[in-house]
Image (cartoon, coloured by chain):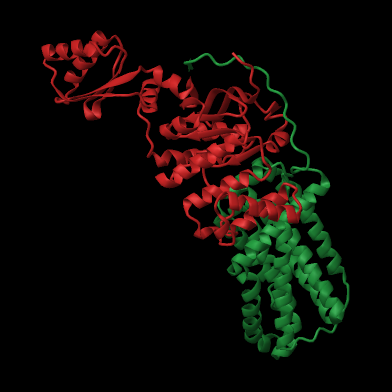
Chain colours: A green, B red
Amino acid sequence: MTTLAPTPTTTSSPRVTPRPGIGGTGPAATVRQSFTMAYRGLVKIRRTPEQLFDVTLMPIVFTVMFTYIFGGAISGDVGSYLPVIIPGILVQTAITSSVVTGVQLREDMDKGVFDRFRSLPIARIAPLAGALLADTVRYAIATTITFVVGIVMGLRPAGGLGAVLLAALLVIVVAWAISWVFAYFGVIARTASSVSGIANLVLFPLTFLSNAFVPTDTLPAWLRWFTEVNPVSHLITAVRDLVNHGVVGGDLWLSLLGAAVVVAVFAPLTVRAYMRKA
Amino acid sequence: MTTTPLAVEATGLVKTFGSNRAVDGVDLRVEAGTVYGVLGPNGAGKTTTISMLATLLRPDGGEARVLGHDVRREPQTVRSLIGVTGQYASVDETLSATENLVIFARLLGLSRGDAKRKAVELLERFGLSEAASRPLKKFSGGMRRRLDLAASLIAQPPLIFLDEPTTGLDPRTRAQMWDTIRELVATGSTVLLTTQYLDEADQLADRIAVIDHGRVVAEGTADELKSSVGTASLQLRLADADADALATAASLVERVLGTPAVVSPEGARLTAPMTAPDRVTDLLVSFREAGVSLAEMSVQKPTLDEVFLTITGSPTSADADTDTESERALEGSPA
């Protein structure tokens, strides 16, 4: 190094204290910042409504299409197929849309705005928590639309409104839990498209090789075994029990337990990977 | 020698990406209330240095204190004292200008009302009021940069990092940005800016560090840097572009003027600091005697370009975009 001029002999660097009220990482501040980040997610959705196609148009198209294709063949007529397929489509849509959490997180983290979040004196976890929080709105939309389409087509939930709401809540909770899995992939993946690529590879068989569309007793033994252990089947059964019979069955507790396990495993994993990057 | 408080004090900062030492022992001392320019070509390590000072990257070696707080041990305190405006606008494309500012202000702990007021005030100050509710996709590059800068000022930080604030802007927008930066300093903020434009450092910075290959190669005020390469420089272009003639000319310059010339073979050019104008006559005579014929001769007052050339031994390349890309990619690596 060529010092061209003598550097002033300054060694005093007084500690400047930040002004009070700027940022913060305490629990209250973290919650508030997470809600602000969730608000940001919602404004972005409002600005780009096409982001919502997977939770608005998809359930409509799938419900109408599959009900009319499979209805007669499987249940004799469309009306008696609805109680079977609506829970199936509901779970499929919600779980599939949980992938978006990971994809959008990756896209977000690649953008310049993330550098700013990282340079702010805020809780490191807030952007992640906010993204997951905002996505529950997506699952709520998907759930509502699927039920409405079903009811329009003739579904009369025997379980009553309370049971339907409970079923909706169950699906939202489980979808939120699963979104941690994709959030993890979102954090560690290199590109957004790789996240959705991997996710579809896993989710397509997982949702179709279940009891979502057909009764499993016609399947070959090995496939039936798979559909019976498939957690998606348990969730669908739980939703059917609630919607069609108003019953809180063992499958509901099993689904919630599964969701809890997923969160217990993937939340720490995701947070750790995210903190290392953020 | 006065004792001025230091806003930034970095000693031996090192950051390596794989086998590449992007920052290789950088020392910086920035006095409070001044504009400090970090000048260097693409890939010199400017952005990496700023990223470490702004707690976006963890240094692999060395020490850095920002307003008295260690960047490694007290990153959260440092973050509450700085504003960072990155090389690429760090604002949300899909949101409007107001929404962007309100969200940043809310994150910083302002109430809903205060956040709105702050957003309105900043948009006014940066001449963006009219575009306040338009989505950013429709913003020009200059507007985006101004919004970016506005976002860095929400918490009124005493220290502001500006990473290449005018790269890619047209001359008029650049001048506007310069005015904005000058106003910032007038309000008492300390600004540390990086730039690859020598005139920008010359215009804005009180002190300049020239950085190349991850090291500070020179430091001082713009005038000190300029005078280090002579009061003026002699520019010669040879009629004959072959290497022999160039070598002969270079050795004559060194012998007669007593200082080595910087040779740029592509234009058959020689640049030499001109400390004693009288000797130029001798030089020209010696050229004639050696049969070196000139196509062009001029005397130029020193610019920071020459400083750069003399210090780093290579011309600045302002158009090496690929370097910026790779630097950016590297900086995306985990901290």
Tell which of A49 and A43 is nearer to you: A43
Considering the image in quadrants, where does the C terminus of chain B appear? top right
Q: Horizontal and vertical percent for residue B208?
A: 49, 26
The residue lying at 57 percent from left, 39 percent from top is B333
Q: Horizontal and vertical percent for residue B174?
A: 45, 43
Considering the image in quadrants, where does the N terminus of chain B appear? top right
Write down the quadrant of residue B25 in the picture.
top right
Q: Is residue B177 above or below residue B253?
A: below
Q: Horizontal and vertical percent for residue A10?
A: 63, 17
Q: How many marks?
A: 0
Q: Is residue A215 visible?
A: no
The residue lying at 48 percent from left, 44 percent from top is B176
Q: Is residue B291 left or right of residue A228?
A: left
Q: Is residue B302 visible?
A: yes
Write down the quadrant of residue A200 in the picture.
bottom right
Tell which of B322 and A273 is nearer to you: B322
Q: Residue furthest bottom?
A: A77
Tell which of B224 and A207 is nearer to you: B224
Write down the quadrant of residue B15 in the picture.
top right
Q: Is residue B196 left or right of residue B31?
A: left
Q: Horizontal and vertical percent for residue B55?
A: 64, 35
The residue lying at 63 percent from left, 57 percent from top is B98
Tell which of B291 and A105 is nearer to you: B291
